[in-house]
Image (tube, rainbow, N blue to C red):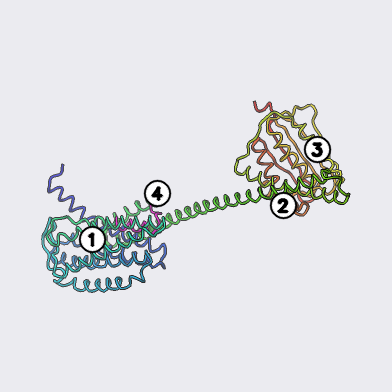
């Protein structure tokens, strides 16, 4: 337990040191807020308010360490010169923050006029009557007759902003409400502590805590302006380190034994102040940039969801219309309404083919969206890869013959082509897509399909002598909607989703898909590698 003299000494030490903490905290935070937007009038008013706290706190410190009554009286006048302006700058800041400055011009002007008046009378006995020992302080000022009117006005201009902030809460948006709460909390802490500074002027035995709570007050208000970025751990760590260094150097400068040491410490403090501000600003900008990136990511995710929903809605609607049209044209072609005339039948067959192509396109778009979201379910069964590829080649031979292309299938007959996977998905979206593309993008020549098995891997290759892949198109391969230059020229109906879906399916089967091409006009070979059934054991 501390003895009463020891406890009193500790309290006096806190009261002496705390104004220095206010000086450093208020100065740094004021500068940081101002530099975030120098042209912002709200930030400028806050900066002036912070400077008033700095002036008051520094004079408060020098008053407490004064050795004579004359020095103490002088610094009492100086600290009041700063304290007088604090509530009026704060009131102006709140009106700008709430965007009611224009409607509050009279009160703002009256407040500044009162501040000028009391700043003048502050230097007369009408404001500070004298100075003497009180409550453990060797030199405490006593109030003159004009001090009480100042206190009344001080309380009015400190309390009215609270009323304005509370009123705004009912009308403000969620983000602004949070800012207001921080300002209200800071105001409550700061002004409740500030009230205690005036009790001793009239002999009321209450210790003055305002110099201790002032830095908390400034910090919470600045948090509201800077939109909480100071809560980030990186910024907090940087500020604590820099603030501690500033405070140490500042106290060292004041306690220097010689004038030369004071000058050196002052230069070091100034350099540290500049470097520290730059450090905190750089960390703050990093946090701000990261927050902006995260916000953009959220916006992009929301935009993607809206786009996907729109695509699915439109696609499902179009699919419904196309399905009805497909059924109608199929009924005509198949003679459900009687044998159609040759011209009508030919027209209906072409229309049916186009409608089926449209349905396939819509299904590709829907499938791409489902694969992207990972909502596709696969039926994993044992199947014969050779049988599936052979069937696809047989189905596409008429299309190759129509273009006068040779379509050959080469299979190593001694190998076992048993695999595990969703045969329907692989057949439709991988094997069929690759071989069909080879036919479409080969104006003349051949398409060669090969199957082989080596070391537990089943390899399908589809080689053509077609248009090849341009270097500019390589980055688009296997991407969603990634249509190349040649694909658009050769196949105007290309959706760009085929290879994206194929890769998604192959990846889901723990396989690989890739291609080789020497360039435009030199053909392309696509490869699909899947694990053999025995390799999965």
Is 218 situated left or right of 128 in this image?
Answer: right
Q: Residues within 10 Å of mark 4 (few under 14, many from 20)?
A: few
Residue at label 4?
233
> What distance separates the C-alpha of mark 2 from that of mark 4?
47 Å
Q: Give percent across and percent down for residue 206.
A: 15, 55
Is 58 situated left or right of 286 in this image?
Answer: left
Q: Is mark 3 on a helix, strand or loop?
A: helix
Find residue 393 and name its label. 3
Q: Residues within 10 Å of mark 3 (few under 14, many from 20)?
A: many
> What distance separates the C-alpha of mark 1 from that of mark 4?
39 Å
Residue at label 1?
258
Labelled pair 1, 4 in contact (Cβ < 8 Å): no
Label 1 vs 4, first from the N-terminus: 4
What span is in magenta? 216-231
Q: In this view, does 377 lie above or below 77?
A: above
Nearest-to-viewer mark from 3 and 4: 3
């Amino acid at each position: 337990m501390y003895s009463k003299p020891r406890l009193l000494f500790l309290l006096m030490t806190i009261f002496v040191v705390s104004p220095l903490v206010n000086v450093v905290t208020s100065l740094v935070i004021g500068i940081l807020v101002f530099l975030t937007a120098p042209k912002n009038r709200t930030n400028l008013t806050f900066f002036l308010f912070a400077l008033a706290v700095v002036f008051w706190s520094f004079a408060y410190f020098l008053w407490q360490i004064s050795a004579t009554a004359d020095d103490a009286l002088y610094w009492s006048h100086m600290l009041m010169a700063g304290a007088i302006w604090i509530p009026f700058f704060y009131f102006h800041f709140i009106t700008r923050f709430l965007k009611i400055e224009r409607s509050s011009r009279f009160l703002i002007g009256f407040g500044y006029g009162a501040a000028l008046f009391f700043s003048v009378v502050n230097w007369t006995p009408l404001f500070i009557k004298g100075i003497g020992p009180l409550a453990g302080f060797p030199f405490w000022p006593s109030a003159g007759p004009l001090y009480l009117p100042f206190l009344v006005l001080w309380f009015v201009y400190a309390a009215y902003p609270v009323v304005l902030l509370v009123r705004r809460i009912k009308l403000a948006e969620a983000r602004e409400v949070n800012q207001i709460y921080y300002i209200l909390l800071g105001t409550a802490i700061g002004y409740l502590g500030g009230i205690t500074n005036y009790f001793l002027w009239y002999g009321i035995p209450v210790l003055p805590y305002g110099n201790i709570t002032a830095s908390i007050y400034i910090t919470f208000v600045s948090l509201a302006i800077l939109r909480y970025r100071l809560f980030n751990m990186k910024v907090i760590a940087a500020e604590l380190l820099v603030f501690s260094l500033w405070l140490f150097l500042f106290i060292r400068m004041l306690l220097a034994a010689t004038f030369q040491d004071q000058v050196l410490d002052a230069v070091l403090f100034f350099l540290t102040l500049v470097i520290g501000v730059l450090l905190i600003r750089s960390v703050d900008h990093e946090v701000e940039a990261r927050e902006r990136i995260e916000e953009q990511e959220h916006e992009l995710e929301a935009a993607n969801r809206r786009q996907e929903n729109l695509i699915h809605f439109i696609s499902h609607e179009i699919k419904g219309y196309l399905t009805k049209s497909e059924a109608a044209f199929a009924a005509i072609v198949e003679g459900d309404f009687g044998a159609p005339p040759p011209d009508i039948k030919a027209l209906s067959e072409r229309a049916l083919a186009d409608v089926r192509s449209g349905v396939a396109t819509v299904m590709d778009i829907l499938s791409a969206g489902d694969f992207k979201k990972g909502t596709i379910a696969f039926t994993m069964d044992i199947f014969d890869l050779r049988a599936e590829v052979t069937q696809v080649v047989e189905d596409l031979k008429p299309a190759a013959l129509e273009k006068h292309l040779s379509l050959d299938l080469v299979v190593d007959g001694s190998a076992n082509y048993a695999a595990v996977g969703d045969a329907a998905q692989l057949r439709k979206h991988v094997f069929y897509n690759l071989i069909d593309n080879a036919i479409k993008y080969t104006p003349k020549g051949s398409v060669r399909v090969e199957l082989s098995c080596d070391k537990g891997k089943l390899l399908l290759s589809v080689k053509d002598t077609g248009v090849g892949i341009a270097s500019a198109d390589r980055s688009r391969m296997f991407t969603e909607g990634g249509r190349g230059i040649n694909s658009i020229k050769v196949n105007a109906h290309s959706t760009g989703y085929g290879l994206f879906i194929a890769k998604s399916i192959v990846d889901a089967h723990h396989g690989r898909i890739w291609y080789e091409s020497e360039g435009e006009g030199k053909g392309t070979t696509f490869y699909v590698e899947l694990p053999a059934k025995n390799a999965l054991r």
